[in-house]
Each structure stands twice: as structure tokens, then as C-alpha cells.
Amino acid sequence: MVHSKTLADSIEDLLPQTQCTKCGYAGCRPYAEAIAHGAANYNQCPPGGLEGVQRLASLLGKPVIPLNPANGAERPRPLAIIDENLCIGCTLCIQACPVDAIIGAPKQMHTVVTSLCTGCDLCVAPCPVDCISMQPITGTATGWRAWPQKAADAARAHHHLRQARKAREQAQTATRISARQAAAHLASQPAQAGSAQSADNAEDSAAKKRAIIQAALERARQKKETLATQETSPKNTEPATPALPQEASNNKQKNR
């Protein structure tokens, strides 16, 4: 099935694919989509420079305008250099690189793969020991003169590979978390069943007590109604104390 290119696709093809985010977006593709939707201007890509603006203006049928200085300046292509004597192997630069141009292991010295580095600068800020510097390597050549289309195509391919790898890793992490949660849930089920059984037993016991009390109250009510009908009072409610003084007097006379 053949898919026709969208405007965002055509714009992305004209971007240098450094993924530097200097345009204000997370990468070249998001910037291309923003231009296509009118949310961003076409002069926000410093790596593309003035020639990049000209390319986009031609595609969009708009006039050539200066590069927006708020996004940076056109410059020679830089290369990230890691000072191996200072590197502590924190891996933060590896995580920041959009094209996997830095290799290394935790607590081990890192190094830059020269042929893959896009000069995006994204590895510099995260470094806690400031061991990364950006060195210009194209002399006076800037913009597209310092960054041929072949390099842009390779950078885009490596960026896509990185995105696919990260997606796989995220999916695997989510699967592991789900498996742990499912195992924890299964392990807790017997305890939950026991707790539920105990709760049911307690409720049954309380219900029985309520029934017994209610029955006793009903019997007392019926007895009271029966006594009231017979116009008698319960025998155990007759006063016993009035006879006591007479009995005491009789006993006193006998003793005389």
C-alpha cells in the first residue's frame, strides 16, 4: 500500500535531523508537524541555517526570512569530545544522546562515536563533572554546507532505531511490572479469603446475638401484655419490707 506524503513529511525531509531541540520542539519530526499546523515558524532551525530557511520557504511558498536568533545562531558543525580523565561513567550523556552516538557502561569511561555525533549539544548539560566539550570540526562551513544530506539521512535512521529500542524497553518494563503486580495479587488472595471468611463469621455471630436479644424483648413484651390483661402484677414485684416491723414486734413479745 502506497502512502502519499503529508506536508509534515515533506518538511521533515528538509530538516538536518540533528534532533538538537533548538527549534523549541523535542526533535525534527515534532518541529515539522508544528510548522505544518502553523504552530511554529520555519526559521527556528539553527543547524539548517539560512539555507534551511530557504528550503522551507520554497516548499511552503513563503518569503525567505532571517533565522530567529532566539533559537540560536548558524555555526560550524561541532563534535562532542569527552575528557576521559574526568568522566565518572554516570551514563547521563548516553541517556541524552538522541542518536546513540555515545557508548560506555555505568562507572566506566564513555566515548563518542565520531561518525554518529550530530553536534546537538544535548549531552553537555547533564554531565555532572563538565567533562564534555563541543569542538567545531568543519572550519568556516556552516549550516547545510557543514552537514550534507547523507549525514542527515543517517542521523534520522539512528534516531528512529533509538526510539524503537526505547519503546521496546518501556514495553518490557511495563510487562515486568504487570507480572510482579499479578504475582503479588495472587499471593494475597488466600489472606484476603481468610479475612473475608472471618468477616462473614463475625457478621453471622452478630446477627445471631441480635436475633436472641430481639426474641427476649418480644417475650418480655408479650408477658407484660398478658399480665396487664389479667389485671395482675408480676409476683416478684410485691414489696417485702412492710412485714418486717411486725415480725420484729412479735419476736420481741415472745422474748419477754
Image (cartoon, grey):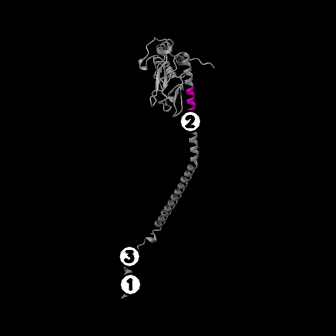
Nearer to us in this view, 252 or 14: 14
Position above or below: 195 against 155: below
Residue 131 in the image: state x and y as whole percent: 46, 28
Q: Residue 173 — which label? A: 2
| Residue mark closest to the camera, 2 vs 1 | 2
Residue 191's place in the image compared with 30, above or below, is below
Label 2 neighbourhood size at 10 Å, few (<14), some (14-19), many (20+)? few
Tag shown at residue 55: none
Q: Quadrant of the N terminus?
A: top right
Give SS at disc 1.
helix
Between 143 and 221, which is closer to the camera in this rendering?
143
Q: Earlier in the sequence, mark 2 or mark 1?
A: 2
Q: Kindly identify the amino acid type of the residue bearing the numbered disc 2.
A: Thr
Residue at image coords 57%, 25%:
161
Q: Are marks 1 and 3 in contact (CB under 8 Å)?
A: no
Say if the magenta span includes residue 176.
yes
The stretch of residues the image draws in magenta is 161-177
Q: CA distance from mark 1 to mark 3?
A: 16 Å
Vertical placement of 53 versus 193: above or below? Answer: above
Q: Residue 250 appears at what percent x and percent y? A: 38, 84
Residue named by callout 3 = 242
**Neighbour class for label 3 at 10 Å: few (<14), some, many (≥20)?**
few
Q: Secondary structure at mark 2?
A: helix
Closer to us: 81 or 67: 81
Residue at numbered disc 1: 251
Of helix, strand and loop, which mostly describes the magenta segment?
A: helix
Report the amino acid beneath label 3: Pro
Q: Nearer the viewer, mark 3 or mark 2?
A: 2
x then y, percent, for residue 44: 45, 18
Q: Earlier in the sequence, mark 1 or mark 3?
A: 3
Indicate yes or no whether the magenta region holds residue 221: no
